[in-house]
């Protein structure tokens, strides 16, 4: 099989992607925690949600971080795609289509356990 030699533009794009991925990896675990909490919250109160919903309740995150965190939750089996796409409300995306998500069985279990733990803490504090 012949190897394709990358053009200068392809090498620059690859280098920029590597820098972006390194920046995303440097985001704090607190940001990851915030995204997971928002996902579990939305998943518990509504059967379907998109990043449009999450951006409305999250602080400004680094470029690309929300998508990377969502992908991590998908890979971890916490959420899954519904098969539906909606236009992004983020201006920089020019309305490109984004996935609608739902909690998986595992995600529902985690959300339910969080609620049980929250109620137990509230009872203990009273």
Image (spheres, rainbow, N blue to C red):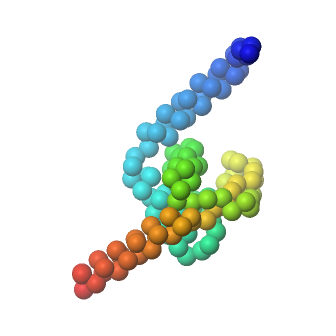
- 100 or 26: nearer the viewer: 100
The residue sitting at 55% across, 50% down in the picture is: 75
**In the image, is residue 55 above or below residue 29?**
below
81 relative to 70 in the view: left or right: right
The residue sitting at 39% across, 53% down in the picture is: 30
Q: Position of residue 89 (x, y in %)?
A: 69, 58
Extreme-left residue of the structure: 125
The residue sitting at 70% across, 48% down in the picture is: 93
- 68 or 90: nearer the viewer: 68
Exactly how many numbered labels are in the figure?
0
Q: Can residue 60 be seen here?
A: no
Q: Position of residue 76 (x, y in %)?
A: 51, 53
48 relative to 70 in the view: left or right: right
Which quarter of the figure is the C terminus placed in?
bottom left
Extreme-front residue of the structure: 1
The residue sitting at 24% across, 81% down in the picture is: 125
């Amino acid at each position: 099989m012949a190897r394709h030699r990358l053009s200068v533009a392809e090498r620059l794009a690859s280098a920029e992607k590597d820098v972006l991925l390194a920046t995303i990896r440097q985001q704090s675990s607190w940001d990851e925690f915030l995204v997971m909490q928002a996902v579990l919250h939305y998943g518990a109160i509504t059967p379907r949600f998109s990043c449009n919903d999450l951006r409305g309740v999250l602080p400004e995150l680094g470029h690309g971080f929300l998508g990377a965190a969502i992908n991590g939750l998908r890979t971890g089996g916490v959420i899954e795609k519904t098969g539906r796409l909606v236009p992004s409300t983020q201006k920089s995306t020019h309305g490109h289509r984004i996935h609608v998500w739902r909690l998986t069985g595992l995600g529902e279990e985690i959300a339910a356990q969080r609620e049980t733990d929250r109620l137990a803490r509230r009872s203990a504090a009273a």
